[in-house]
Image (cartoon, rainbow, N blue to C red):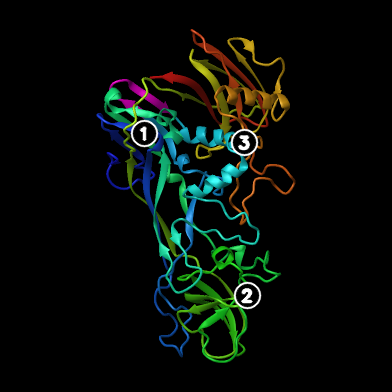
Amino acid sequence: MKISSNQSGAVTASKNLIDFDIPAGMVYDLSKSYMVIHSSIETTDTHTALTNGTGIAAAPQFSGGVGVYDVGLDYSDGTNSNRLFKNKSLIKNVSMFSQKVGMVEDIKRSDVLQYNLDLYRDDLDTQINASYNQVASLFGANAENGIKWSPYRRLSPEGEEESDNLEREIRIGLPEVMNSCKNIWDGNKYGNTRVHAEVSVGNLVAVQNMTNADSIWTATDGGGGIARGIMATAGSGAVTTLTTTRTYPNPAEDSPFFVGQKLEIDFTLDASAKTDFVRQITKIEHNTDKTLKLTLDFTLGTGALSACTVKGVDAASTSLNFDSTELVLYVTNQSPPPQIAFTTYKTEEDNFTGSGNNYNHQYYLESDVQNIFWGARALDKQLGFEEVINSYRIREAGEDKTDRDVTYGSALHLQRLNRAFGNSNMPIRNYTAGILNNGNRISHLIGATGGVDLPAYMIAEPTQVTEMPKLLDVNIVANAGFKLITLFKQIVKVM
């Protein structure tokens, strides 16, 4: 069953609230249900008509036409635009309300919560593999590849079939953002139910891959020392094709060329130097010697071709559109359980703008809180807990959780993390606490010196479930003052 959001029209940075009403009277498997944001990326060209001449003999500098550009998505956090993110990172706040039982879940900063928990719950292989189910995937990890394809484009690396611009569904599973949705949901018992979400589409930006300035064109890795942008010389005659000097055993994986692509070409024709000529690829052939033959839409002129290099062409503009949203519900004949139990989170935020290195704060813990997860960010758009923690100490109801300060990264710190994640039934599979950086052609986590390029800093502690609320004292020594602090308090709820 598909349900359109109550808000009609496109989703934008300022119009970013979506609501879905799940009707009563049926039983749903919410573990298989998901939200969909329909999206597309449009581009425009600078030169769409012949320029500097009108005929073959004139050899125009720009052949015109509308090109296909390899464009994708990045999440811009105000400082970096190259962090790996999942679709669920777009859900800033989320809640579900039932007509008969009231508020089921209400999670503030779900994006920050899920982002940081996944850094510990997912090992590196899981993180990398999961990226290929997301609307923004990682660069290829193969050093001989370095090509980043996009789910918004179907690119043809061989033949004559034109590459296509595609629309894409950004799917966000309900159980990815709310644990109550990992269950069979009885619409007869709970009545009409509303799912509400605030979407952070304003943090997404369209980016073009294999641009004019991309190092891919001069890179020689995996190609016997030959750059991708170097073309072979040719004899006399009308120049309507180019042949690569570099070989490509598997064009579908390692070639930066595709049908419909515009290329900027520098070359010499009969000793006359030409620069910044633009042509479009209409056909790609894989030669027996593994080189590629590129057929152009317009001749470069007549004569002997030499000193020929190519680069990508930048689109004049890109437009990222989120046209509509819907909820896809899985209706089932399964018998619903008599009750459901799940963990959810209450959120408390703080802002410590002082210049000191010591942070001391008292938090109010409700009686049913069983674990806490604490971290800080420099900017609101940042998802990872990247504010540095040197050491910390926590007291619950006046009692120290440890007999000494906990140094971040120490064995004691890892033991405290293990206790909290284990108490949450979320085993830790990754102790690097590192954020995948997708800025280079080869995705990486570990830097050149062996350290994590983008480390995250989280404090996690189990707490006692009691009959009465209590206070939690947090004392932290850091490199500098924290700005945006978030405490997630995990509770168990039974319905």
State the residue at coordinates (41%, 47%). 170
Q: Give the magenta range.
A: 96-107
Q: Is residue 391 visible?
A: no
Q: Is residue 98 magenta?
A: yes
| Residue 200 covered by magenta stretch | no
The reply to whether callout 2 and callout 1 are in contact (CB within 8 Å) is no
Q: Give the vertical position of 316 relative to 198 (above or below).
A: below
Type of amino acid at the residue the image marks with label 1: Asp
**Mark 1 neighbour class, 10 Å CA radius: few under 14, some 14 to 19, many 20 or more:** some
In three-dimensional space, the C-alpha distance between marks 2 and 1, rounded to whole angstroms, equals 55 Å
Circle 2 sits in a helix, a strand or a loop, which is it?
A: loop
Q: Is residue 364 above or below residue 268?
A: above
Residue placed under numbered mark 2 in the picture: 230
| Residue 456, disc | 3
Q: Secondary structure at mark 1?
A: strand
Amino acid residing under circle 3: Ala
Question: Which image quarter is the C terminus in?
Answer: top left
> How far apart in space, not on screen, are marks 3 and 1 (Cα)?
35 Å
Which one is closest to the eye, mark 2 or mark 1? Answer: 1
- Residue in the foreground of this view, choosing between 134 and 109: 134
* Residue 434 percent across, percent down from the top left: 63, 40
Q: Nearer the viewer, residue 255 or 300?
A: 255
Residue shown at the point (57%, 43%) measured from the top left: 127
**Looking at the image, which is closer to me, 224 or 240?**
224
Image quadrant holding the N terminus, namely top left
Q: Which residue is mark 1?
A: 29
Q: Dot 3: within a 10 Å radius of its alpha carbon, few (fewer than 14), some, or many (20 or more) residues?
A: many
